[in-house]
Image: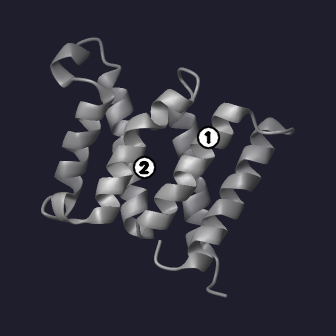
Amino acid sequence: MDDITEVIKFRNWLSDLMHERFRQATPTAYQAATGVANLLAEVLPADRLATFFRVAVEAEEESRQPARFLAGTYSDCLDRGLGRAFKDLYEDDPGLNVAWHLGRVFPNLLPRGEFTPFIQLAQKALERAAALPAS
């Protein structure tokens, strides 16, 4: 994200949403996924983070299709999706490079079927953080 206050807002909203979801201590897997989402917020501006989240969900869904042997693994789908979304920036932007590496492990941190709901919470946190006035 563009400045540290945006990152902090995102972290706070994501933490609040995790607390709302579990109403108790956040399970370890979700703490790890939250850590990855927070790192992504540090290396990507808000608009790129939003795109990254969208592409990650699409890659997860594509890799789970019955004919996934044609689509490839989640990492293959993520790579293609980010390449399409960011075109020329993809290979030259260090933040996107870091995001790709972090994104590859993302779905493996969570129980099966929980990646997309987690990303949806992260997207909601990003929207809320963006809606707050600058401090």
Looking at the picture, does residue 11 appear above or below residue 134? Answer: above
Q: If the image is split into quadrants, where does the C terminus sit?
A: bottom right
Q: Residue at x 31, y 24 (%)?
A: 63
Per the image, the residue denoted by label 2 is: 53
Instruction: Return the residue nearer the eye: 32 or 57.
Output: 32
Where, by quadrant of the figure, is residue 57 drawn?
top left
Where, by quadrant of the figure, is residue 14 drawn?
bottom right
| In-image side of 79 versus 87 (left or right) | right
The answer to whether the residues at label 2 and label 1 have Cβ atoms under 8 Å apart is no
Query: From this viewpoint, which residue is outermost toward the top?
Result: 66
Instruction: Return the residue nearer the eye: 130 or 104.
Output: 104
Per the image, the residue denoted by label 1 is: 32
> Residue 134, position in %: x, y?
61, 86
Instruction: Return the residue nearer the eye: 50 or 98.
Output: 98
What whole-number distance in Å separates the C-alpha atoms at marks 2 and 1?
A: 16 Å
Instruction: Return the residue nearer the eye: 11 or 66.
Output: 11
Which of the two discs, 2 and 1, labels the residue nearer the N terminus?
A: 1
- Local crowd at mark 2 within 10 Å, few (<14), some, or many (≥20)? many
Q: Secondary structure at mark 1?
A: helix
Query: From this viewpoint, which residue is outermost toward the right?
Result: 24
Looking at the picture, does residue 6 appear above or below residue 15? Answer: below
Amino acid under label 2?
Phe
Q: Residue at x 65, y 61 (%)?
A: 11
Query: From this viewpoint, which residue is outermost toward the bottom?
Result: 135
Count of numbered circles in the view: 2
Q: Residue at x 57, y 57 (%)?
A: 38
> Residue 100, position in %: x, y?
33, 48
> Residue 72, position in %: x, y?
22, 23
Q: Is residue 32 visible?
A: yes
